[in-house]
Image (tube, rainbow, N blue to C red):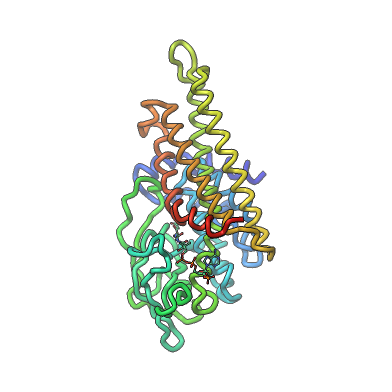
Amino acid sequence: MLRDAVRALSEAKIAPFAAEVDEEARFPQEALDALVAADLHAVHVPEEYGGAGADALATVIVIEEVARVCASSSLIPAVNKLGSLPVVLSGGEDLKKKYLGPLAKGDGMFSYCLSEPDAGSDAGGMKTKAVRDGDSYVLNGVKRWITNAGVSEYYTVMAVTDPDLRTKGISAFVVEKGDEGVSFGAPEKKLGIKGSPTREVYLDNVRIPADRLIGAEGTGFATAMKTLDHTRITIAAQALGIAQGALDYASGYVKERKQFGKPVADFQGVQFMLADMAMKLEAARQLTYSAAARSQRVSDGGDKEHLTFFGAAAKCFASDVAMEITTDAVQLLGGYGYTRDYPVERMMRDAKITQIYEGTNQIQRIVMARNLP
Ligand code: CAA
């Protein structure tokens, strides 16, 4: 039922703008409005904070269905989860009440600020500093590649509170867009997900109340990593959705397109391609849903159940599969697939980022190797 509902909404209210959002590299406001109206913009927020209380698998299905028509729009529910999960996992009760309520209501989105110009894969090498000063912290630094920056009201920012302790000297904070000293860089000019703004976040002597610290000082890196264990699964969901959109389009197209007097779908070479695409996609889906079930059991207080491995594996596998499937979809449309008159070239460009963000697939393999089940 959830899938049917999100699919109907996505096709009616998000798909019609997907090409334009990509072409004009503009934020998909129509998608945000439709998702907020249907309470699907941040489904993971627990009911006690005014949210829909969706479990990890339901959240995956929402993201997957939105991504099937528009990858940029799927970053609304995905990054709302990424940005706010540190508060859910490690924040105190007051912080949760203060920020999860407005997020659930649709009053403000959340972004996640881990990466920096010189700290990408090596997230622990960050330089942004937070210095305690009485009842405040003062933050200085630059965060880069911040999804939905400028649109979001709230930012989870990881910053160094003790430079001698490397990852154990990193703390997490909530910073608000309106805090004095917060500003944003020019939007990055990207290959895909063009509707989702990616900008730098500048923190220039940003003074915030000390109670915006998430958890204890020095736990920010662990919180950031624990968050990614859960949210890499949402990137896998996005990859599944993009790939499903490309497969659906290509499988319809080959039935219509005639060459040598018959639909190209009648040629065995084309059938083999479609079969491989569908087979890989289903394998990726099963791994992703299994990872989501583990994510939920951990959130419910269960054992870790190799979540770190499964989160990395789902993200890595599903994104590699999405890149293959979208590339094959372009191939199945031939010359037409290479033009912007058809959606599969956009899907191929959008798929690429899923191999890169929330940790490159090379980093995922390092994470898997360190956490073999
Ligand atoms: N759960 C809990 N704690 C963890 C953890 C996990 N999965 N992984 C690490 N930690 C904690 C532990 O306390 C650990 O200390 P111990 O070993 O003493 O337990 C500490 O962190 C340090 O861990 P590592 O020694 O493993 O740290 P490292 O410096 O070697 O880095 C890494 C590990 C996996 C490479 C990590 O830096 C990483 O994940 N890099 C990729 C960064 C990334 O994914 N960035 C994504 C940005 S967000 C984004 O892309 C969003 C978007 O746009 C949509």
Q: Nearer the viewer, residue 160 or 165?
A: 165
Q: Residue furthest toward the bottom?
A: 134
Q: Nearer the viewer, residue 29 or 268?
A: 268
Q: How many marks?
A: 0
Q: Quadrant of residue 280?
A: top right
Residue at horizontal 48 percent and vertical 63 percent from the top: 110
Residue 230 on image: x %, y %? 57, 58
Residue 297 on image: x %, y %? 68, 59
Residue 61 visible in the displayed image: no
Residue 354 on image: x %, y %? 45, 48
Q: Nearer the viewer, residue 316 or 117?
A: 316
Location of residue 340 with respect to 231 vertically, above or below: above
Asked if residue 248 lies left or right of residue 164, the reply is right
Instruction: Give the quarter of the figure containing the N terminus.
Output: top right
Instruction: Give the quarter of the figure containing the C terminus.
Output: bottom right
Residue 325 on image: x %, y %? 48, 36
